[in-house]
Amino acid sequence: MTNLGAEENSLDVNLRLRVGGDGPEGGGSGWLRGIFVPLVTPFDRDGTRVDAAALERLGHEVVDGGATGIVALGTTAEAGALDAAERRLVADVCARVCTERGVPLVVGVGANDTRKAVEELAALAGPGPGPGPESGGASSVVPTAALVTVPSFTRPSEAGVVAHFAALAAGSPVPLVIYHIPYRTGRALSAATLRELAALPGVAGVKHAVGGVDADAVALLGDPAVAASGFAVMAGDDLYVSPMLALGASGGVLASAHLATAAFAALADRWERGDAAGARVLGHHLARLSAALFAEPNPVVLKGVLAAQGRIPHATVRLPHLPAAPENVAAALRALDDVDRGAGGTAEAAA
């Protein structure tokens, strides 16, 4: 089983990339590919404090394992359970890791209404309110991009969703990655709407998490115009990352890739190189790992595994999450061992 191991610098051009990733003036979303890991937020034993040191170690570990980039303040981070100061701390720690390692940072931004989302994105330009809902105080984080959910609960029309993101993109200081997760937001988007969103200036891509591989995903990934535009489709359902990559997804934003990071990176590489036979076998092993990790609501089993590995001191989650059942943590650890055995070890898998 693989345990990946690895000063404070001011934010530099590595975190000031615009769409393209080759520099501030990049013209495409070439940086948005491969495996991005949405980091958990480690807490102390009673859950009253963010363990910044453990978070920083995790960030370095996943980059060591082959992650292309990091996502801060996503669903896996329990961002909704963090206060404003904690969100700033998490974003700043992740920014420090990404600056030191020269990899992209995507920061989650969530708001149900357009005006509030515009304010949160404007705050990413530099000192001022930190990212995340109900944020306040100063933050130095200028990320590569913002991961922005489709407005949840309000269930706007698809035309309203397009208008929402057009307004956000027009004023955002960083590119947007749309987070399309209809089983959380209550709003499904057709392939036609996703094409409209892809055409918006300032929209780099989409994290596509619809609970499977649907007809709209097939249509979007099979559209030559979308592919030519540089719009990145990132798999957002861990269980289905392999078929999404087979269809042409640029990569994945995967909580499961805290574990067996090198194997997930190898999976993306194999599909890109056209090694379908090798990718298919590896993908089946990784799908079983992801299924075990999502046996309970994310990230409770994942945190249990990370604590069992000694990579975070405690598996603590905040309410309304509850700690994972021990048998589910044990099952995920067995699935992780199966990945290492079935892939011949992550080192060989990455070759």
Image (spheres, rainbow, N blue to C red):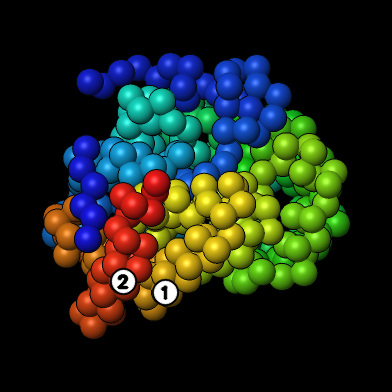
Q: Quadrant of residue 115?
A: top right
Q: Is residue 317 visible?
A: no
Asked if residue 261 lies left or right of residue 237, the reply is left
Where is residue 284 shown, x and y percent of the image?
A: 47, 71
Q: Is residue 226 visible?
A: yes
Label 1: which secondary element: helix
Instruction: Give the quarter of the figure containing the N terminus.
Output: bottom left
- The residue mark sitting in front, 1 or 2, is 2
Where is residue 40 shown, x and y percent of the image?
A: 34, 53
Q: Quadrant of residue 63?
A: top left
Q: Are marks 1 and 2 in contact (CB under 8 Å)?
A: yes
Mark before the other along the chain sequence, 1 or 2 = 1
Local crowd size for mark 2, using a 10 Å CA cut-off: few (<14), some (14–19), many (≥20): some
Label 2: which secondary element: helix
**Residue at horizontal 79 percent and vertical 55 percent from the top:** 222
Asked if residue 245 lies left or right of residue 5, the reply is right
The residue indicated by pointer 2 is 338
**Residue at horizontal 41 percent and vertical 25 percent from the top:** 102
Residue 119: mark: none
Work out whether 278 lies above or below 253: below
Nearest the viewer among 146 and 248 is 248
Nearest the viewer among 107 and 258 is 258
Work out whether 235 lies above or below 103: below
